[in-house]
């Protein structure tokens, strides 16, 4: 399934609106909390590609909600690198049994769901993702919201005309 085939349905339009309101009224961290409330994953974050390093821009941790930012990571040790390389969403329910990633990425992350964030010029900027060190159930219904949220979050983090 490619990005263009994922279309939001009526309930998803409502959720996109709810997300946008939270983002505008309460900011990026609250918006990540909203996204995280819809998934079993512990973490929801925005990550930026920076050469061989994946930079965490903002992180929501459901078990430590005061945490605003996580650690950076070597690009080669992240599933975000695969999203960037393939320029397509990636969902992994259990990395220990998923043939697409088993032995490819050396990370403690077991479950991952991420979408590409593009910059204003359409180039890969980073990812918006949910992840966990435990196995989580697949949530394909969240992809349209994550993709809509990725664009809104980029615009909030990098407003037009601001370097």
Image (cartoon, rainbow, N blue to C red):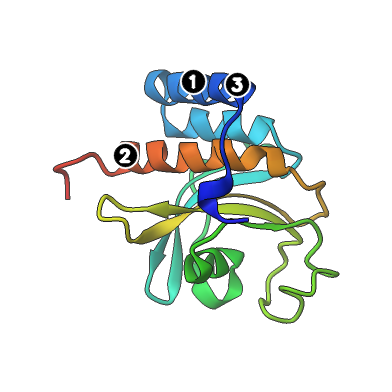
Tell whether label 1 touches label 2 (CB within 8 Å): no
Give the labeled residue for mark 3. 10
Is residue 104 shown left or right of residue 128? right
State the separation of the CA atoms marked 2 and 1. 16 Å
Look at the image and tell me whether residue 66 can be seen. Answer: no
Q: Residue at x 44, y 71 (%)?
A: 53
The percent position of residue 86, horizontal first and vertical second, equals 52, 69
Q: Is residue 106 above or below residue 37?
A: below
The percent position of residue 38, horizontal first and vertical second, equals 69, 32
Mark in the foreground, 3 or 2: 3
Tell whether label 3 touches label 1 (CB within 8 Å): no
State the separation of the CA atoms marked 3 and 2. 24 Å
Give the labeled residue for mark 1. 17
Q: Residue at x 68, y 71 (%)?
A: 107
Q: Residue at x 56, y 69 (%)?
A: 82
Q: Quadrant of residue 39?
A: top right
Mark 1 residue crowding within 10 angstroms, few (<14) / some (14–19) / many (20+): some
Report the front residue among 3 and 115. Answer: 3
| Local secondary structure at mark 1 | helix
Give the labeled residue for mark 2. 155
Q: Is residue 142 above or below residue 92?
A: above
Q: Of marks 2 and 1, which one's residue comes earlier in the chain?
A: 1
Look at the image and tell me whether residue 123 can be seen. Answer: yes
Mark in the foreground, 2 or 1: 1
Q: Which quadrant does the N terminus fall into?
A: bottom right
| Local secondary structure at mark 2 | helix
Report the front residue among 45 and 65. Answer: 45
| Local secondary structure at mark 3 | helix
């Amino acid at each position: 399934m490619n990005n263009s085939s994922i279309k939001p349905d009526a309930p998803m339009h409502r959720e996109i609106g709810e997300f946008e309101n939270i983002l505008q009224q309460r900011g990026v961290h609250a918006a990540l909390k909203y996204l995280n409330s819809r998934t079993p994953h512990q973490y929801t974050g925005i990550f930026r590609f920076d050469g061989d390093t994946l930079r965490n821009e903002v992180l929501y941790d459901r078990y430590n909600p005061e945490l605003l930012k996580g650690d950076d990571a070597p690009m080669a040790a992240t599933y975000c690198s695969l999203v960037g390389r393939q320029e397509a969403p990636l969902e992994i329910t259990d990395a220990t049994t998923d043939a697409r990633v088993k032995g490819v990425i050396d990370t403690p992350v077991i479950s991952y769901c991420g979408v590409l964030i593009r910059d204003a010029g359409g180039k890969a900027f980073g990812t918006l993702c949910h992840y966990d060190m435990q196995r989580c159930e697949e949530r394909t219904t969240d992809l349209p919201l994550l993709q809509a949220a990725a664009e809104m979050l980029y615009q909030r983090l990098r407003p037009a005309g601001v370097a």
